[in-house]
Amino acid sequence: KNEVEQSPQNLTAQEGEFITINCSYSVGISALHWLQQHPGGGIVSLFMLSSGKKKHGRLIATINIQEKHSSLHITASHPRDSAVYICAVTSNTGNQFYFGTGTSLTVIP
Amino acid sequence: NAGVTQTPKFRILKIGQSMTLQCTQDMNHNYMYWYRQDPGMGLKLIYYSVGAGITDKGEVPNGYNVSRSTTEDFPLRLELAAPSQTSVYFCASSQTRTMRYSGSPLHFGNGTRLTVT
């Protein structure tokens, strides 16, 4: 079983829709990360959080430490949001990162 | 700052050939990592380094070697390429762990797409 599980694996949305991607983890963490990977491209860090909520533009990330769960929300989705979104955690036992397998998002105009 | 720079972007190797994937960062990060990404799988750690002169194995180190002679550079060496090493390779770096460690962002290179035939 992976230390980090994401759902859904694939997601297709119409432009303008509100999108939620979920992440659950099973290890103790010091931080959770949301990453974005465009097709054929590199990986970019969107958020790092250890409690509460963070917002950047149309993206919102939340984390519930007690439930070991995080969500990434995209408001007013746009085709340029189409990418793979990866959840990762930093373990609290060392500087190790564990990665989910990613959620592939396609936003249709 | 350029961040994390990886070269080459693409490479095709024949079975048994060797090559070095280069990685350099200009953020003075002590922690550096090599990951491989296979279709449908999460990133898997190959090797990591907590500082110059110090390296350690990750989850999937077989068939690879690394060195860390400087803070900036962390090359990954494939000695005898095998088809199972066909993958996308990412180098990453993060800040030093501190006493009040609360995690630090990972900075990734743009990846190297390697095909072994």
Image (cartoon, rainbow, N blue to C red):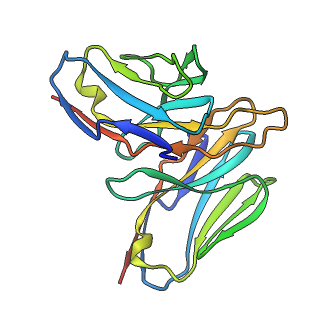
B19 displayed left or right of A96: left
Q: Which residue is drawn at 60% across and 75% down?
A: A57
**Does the image show residue A93?**
yes
Q: Residue furthest front?
A: B1
- For the C terminus of chain B, the image quarter is top left
Q: In which quarter of the view is residue A46 placed?
A: bottom right
Residue B40 at what x, y percent from top left?
38, 47
Q: Is residue A1 visible?
A: no
- Which residue appears at 61% of the width and 34% of the height? B28
Residue at 37 percent across and 42 percent down: it is B111
The image quadrant that residue A109 belongs to is bottom left
The residue that appears at 56% across and 25% down in the rendered structure is: B71
- Vertical placement of B62 versus B22: above or below? above
- In the current view of this chain or complex, which residue is farthest to the right? B100
B30 vs B65, left or right, is right
Q: In this view, does A83 lie above or below A87?
A: below
Q: In this view, does A20 lie above or below B93?
A: below
